[in-house]
Image: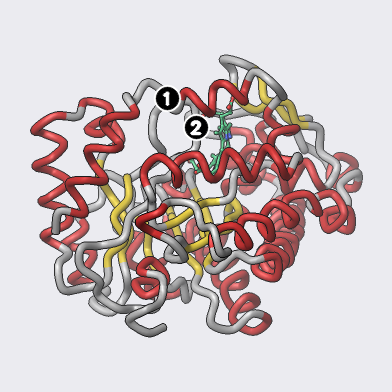
Amino acid sequence: MTETGKPLLRVLQGEAVWPPPLWLMRQAGRYLPEFRALRDKADFITRCMTPDLATEITLQPIRRYAMDGAILFSDILILPWAMGQSLDFVQGTGPVLGAIRSEADLARLDPRRVADATAPVMETLSRLRATLDGPDPIGAAQGGKVALLGFAGAPFTVACYMVEGHGSRDFEATRGMAYANPMLFDRLMDMLTRATADMLCAQIDAGAEAVMLFDSWAGLLPPAQFRRHVIAPTRAIVQEIQTRRPGIPVIGFPRLAGIMAAEYARDTGVKTMALDTGTDMAAMAGLVPDLPLQGNLDPLLLLAGGDAMAAEARSIRDAMKGRPHVFNLGHGVVPPTPPEHVGELVRIVREG
Ligand code: CP3
């Protein structure tokens, strides 16, 4: 990447860019009135699987704020759905899946269905890339400078929802299965590891310029299990992408991993570490001096806005000056966030 490349991609390749490029996890979402307007028109899976809708929703925050990155509008649970697991997003409850608890449940999943079932997602990516890099790009100030991000859930986090059948604070059934029936759990994890690598390669072929692995529940695992179910599958996916699609950076997000995040950063091969709100970014920078970092403003400070948000955003940004840093939140934008606060944050980060 040269000086003229996309700022976000330059940072992911290890360059320090000032002011830092930014995008926000869940930047397309319920806090935006234009998202809520489309939300009434189709259910969540339909929105993910209709290229017209998914393209439009992905671009909404780019139009409003000229973010440096556009993240595909989809979900980490589209992969199990594409393998044949039942999935419903229930208002007020979140995702509900037909729980995988036995060999027979696992045998009903078919990873060979994924390529066909996710074809609309790939169509969305290719339309997004054509729009972002086209003659009439979205976000006037950022014309041709917006990087397109693909993503997947990391195998452990996806397995959490697949086994539990719904969201949870501690995913007891999933962690219980990993101990009590390791053969079954490992088969599920292997299936997910392979299918995730294949799906991310397909996203790259369709136009994604970098990909992020969300491991939202990595922090539930004790160290030995963390190495086995977080580090090992992540390393396998990263190696597969490096071999099959060389040069495409992978961003890793082992949420709530605590001190294990350092081992993850060293051992998985990810090109960038996305840090959650609880991680001291300067301390992590000391441990991995060459690795780009992404994060990590508290989403609740974005919700609160005002001077406290401004001060903390500047403090994170300034602490990372001179090293590769992508400004982001430590987790997703929360639905009650006033859209003006996001505009204010973008202005503050870019004031340099
Ligand atoms: O970041 C983005 O804007 C890109 C799209 C994206 C969504 N989900 C859209 C979405 C991404 C990257 C995700 C990742 C995701 N999905 C994760 C990992 C990141 C994290 O938040 O920890 C997880 C665990 C999921 C699973 C999931 N999807 C849950 C638990 C829920 C329900 C809770 C909620 O926030 O509503 C979803 C639904 C979902 N995924 C919505 C959006 C915009 C809300 C659905 C709606 O509009 O009703």
**In which image quadrant can residue 125 be found?**
bottom right
Between residues 21 and 88, which one lies in front from this camera angle? 21
Quarter holding residue 41: top right
Tag 1 secondary structure = loop
Q: Is residue 283 left or right of residue 25?
A: left
Displayed-image quarter of ligand 1: top right
Distance, label 2 to label 1, CA atoms, is 7 Å
Image quadrant where one finds the N terminus: bottom left
- Is residue 193 something one can see in this rendering? no
Tell me: is circle 2 under 8 Å from ligand 1.
yes
Q: SS for tag 2? A: loop
The answer to whether mark 2 and mark 1 are in CB contact below 8 A is yes
Circle 1 packing at 10 Å, graded few (<14), some (14-19), many (20+), is few
Query: Assess mark 1: CB under 8 A from ligand 1?
Result: yes
Residue 248 appears at what percent x and percent y?
54, 76
Residue 335: numbered disc: 1
Q: Is residue 321 visible?
A: yes
- Residue type at numbered disc 2: Gly
Q: Give 307 or 59, whichever is nearer the viewer.
A: 59
Q: Residue at x 76, y 59 (%)?
A: 191
Q: Which residue appears farthest toward the front when viewing the image?
A: 135
Identify residue for label 2: 29
User: Which comes sooner in the sequence, label 2 or label 1?
Assistant: 2
Q: What is the number of callouts on the image? A: 2
Residue visible at 51% across and 27% down in the picture: 34
Percent position of residue 284, x then y: 23, 64
Identity of the amino acid at label 1?
Pro
Looking at the image, which residue is at 60% across and 54% down?
A: 152
Q: At x 48% / y 57%, what residue is drawn? A: 226
Q: In this view, does 12 lie above or below 84?
A: below
Q: Where is residue 313 in the image (x, y as percent from the top left)?
A: 17, 46
